[in-house]
Image (cartoon, rainbow, N blue to C red):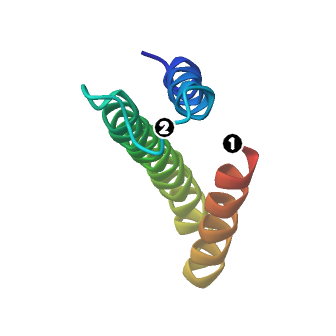
């Protein structure tokens, strides 16, 4: 299920709990299972985003380090690479 679908399922379970006057989950634990799935999906998406950002940062850092190394300005290369990495992450 997508995150939107999971959130919708969780909302429906919570709404039903209120409508039925319950203060607990269903016997089959629908709300708890859905909440666990939401947490897992968010963790998966965060991990994927971090990996994508790290890849962009690494590629840009290598690209700029090569450029600056040819120019002989190593300190400047590190600063440019760090700045580029931050910009790449912010652009996502």
Q: Say which residue label 1 marks.
A: 92
The answer to which of marks 1 and 2 sits earlier in the sequence is: 2
Residue 15 image point, x, y percent: 61, 28
Count of labels shown?
2
Badge 2 element? loop
Residue 84, image x, y percentages:
68, 59
Residue sitting at the far left: 28
Residue 16 spot, x, y in % from top left: 56, 24
Q: Residue at x 45, y 52 (%)?
A: 54
Vertical position of residue 83 compared to residue 13: above or below? below
Residue at (49, 24) in percent of width and height: 6
Q: Quadrant of the N terminus?
A: top left
Q: Which residue is label 2 attached to?
A: 22
Q: Are marks 1 and 2 in contact (CB under 8 Å)?
A: no
Circle 1: is it few (<14), some (14-19), or many (20+) Cα within 10 Å?
A: few
Q: Is residue 71 left or right of residue 35?
A: right
Disc on res. 16: none
The image shows residue 68, relative to residue 51, as above or below, that is below
């Amino acid at each position: 299920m997508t995150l939107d679908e999971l959130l919708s399922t969780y909302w429906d379970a919570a709404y039903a709990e209120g409508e039925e006057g319950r203060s607990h989950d269903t016997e089959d634990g629908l709300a708890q299972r859905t909440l666990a799935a939401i947490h897992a999906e968010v963790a998966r998406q965060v991990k994927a985003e971090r990996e994508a950002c790290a890849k962009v940062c690494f590629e840009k850092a290598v690209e700029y380090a090569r450029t600056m190394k040819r120019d002989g300005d190593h300190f400047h290369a590190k600063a440019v690479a760090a700045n580029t990495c931050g910009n790449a992450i912010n652009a996502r």
